[in-house]
Image: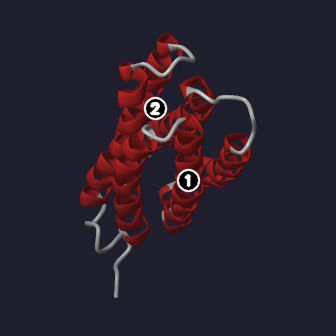
């Protein structure tokens, strides 16, 4: 039987910090992706491998803070999937950008559904509606990536950057939402 950590001040603070960090990493990744341009440079290749690798690391960090991987099965699966995808992206780079986009598509669907499950499981922790929306949108973006990968146009890292930008937006919304909730709660406690 797994225990679900009840929302509290420490949980809200942790999630707020974690979401701000994730938003910052995603914004940095998007900026680097647009800076690298459409051509497949070594920097762009490294960024493509780093994106799912970071997701794996982030899920480990979050799960450890939230009761461990055993208590967070959707995050444990996301760690495994993102780790495998980082390797798969590195391999797919040798086959071409259509293959890379297909790998990203499959990963976006899977990781999106797992993020959605994590958000639903954490619903009482507040601000999870944005994580649920982000997960659902990730799954839809994955389907779009797969369709685009089967097209004639050559994809590039800039095709993935908007996906990461939306992820940053949802993380930022959740972080700000939790920060506001914490501030209101603290103000209420001071006046009580």
Residue 22 in picture, x, y percent from top left: 41, 36
Q: Which mark is residue 110?
A: none
Q: Are marks 2 and 1 in contact (CB under 8 Å)?
A: no
Residue 48 in picture, x, y percent from top left: 43, 34
**67 sits to left or right of 183:** left
Question: Which residue is outermost to the bottom?
Answer: 1
Question: Which residue occupies the foreground of this view, 78 or 156?
Answer: 156
Residue at 51% over, 62% down: 114
**Sequence-wise, which precedes: disc 2 or disc 1?**
2
Residue 189 in picture, x, y percent from top left: 41, 45
Vertical placement of 79 versus 162: above or below?
below
Q: CA distance from mark 2 to mark 1?
A: 15 Å
Q: To which residue does mark 2 refer?
A: 23
Q: To which residue does mark 1 refer?
A: 128
Question: Which residue occupies the foreground of this view, 192 or 92?
Answer: 92
Vertical placement of 6 versus 175: above or below?
below
Residue at 36% over, 69% down: 72
Which of the 4 image quadrants contains residue 117?
bottom right
Residue 98 in picture, x, y percent from top left: 60, 40
């Amino acid at each position: 039987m797994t225990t679900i950590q009840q929302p509290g001040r420490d949980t809200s603070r942790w999630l707020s910090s974690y979401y701000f960090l994730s938003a910052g990493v995603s914004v940095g990744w998007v900026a680097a992706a647009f800076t690298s341009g459409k051509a497949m440079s070594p920097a762009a290749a490294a960024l493509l491998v780093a994106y799912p690798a970071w997701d794996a690391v982030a899920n480990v960090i979050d799960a450890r803070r939230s009761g461990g991987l055993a208590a967070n099965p959707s995050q444990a699966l996301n760690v495994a999937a993102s780790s495998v995808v980082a390797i798969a992206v590195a391999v797919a780079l040798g086959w071409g950008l259509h293959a890379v986009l297909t790998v990203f598509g499959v990963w976006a669907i899977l990781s999106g559904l797992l993020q959605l499950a994590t958000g639903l499981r954490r619903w009482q922790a507040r601000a999870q509606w944005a994580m649920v929306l982000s997960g659902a949108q990730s799954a839809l973006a994955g389907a779009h990536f797969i369709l685009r990968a089967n097209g004639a146009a050559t994809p590039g890292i800039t095709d993935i950057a908007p996906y990461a930008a939306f992820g940053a937006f949802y993380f930022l919304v959740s972080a700000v939402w939790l920060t506001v909730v914490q501030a209101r709660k603290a103000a209420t406690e001071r006046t009580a």
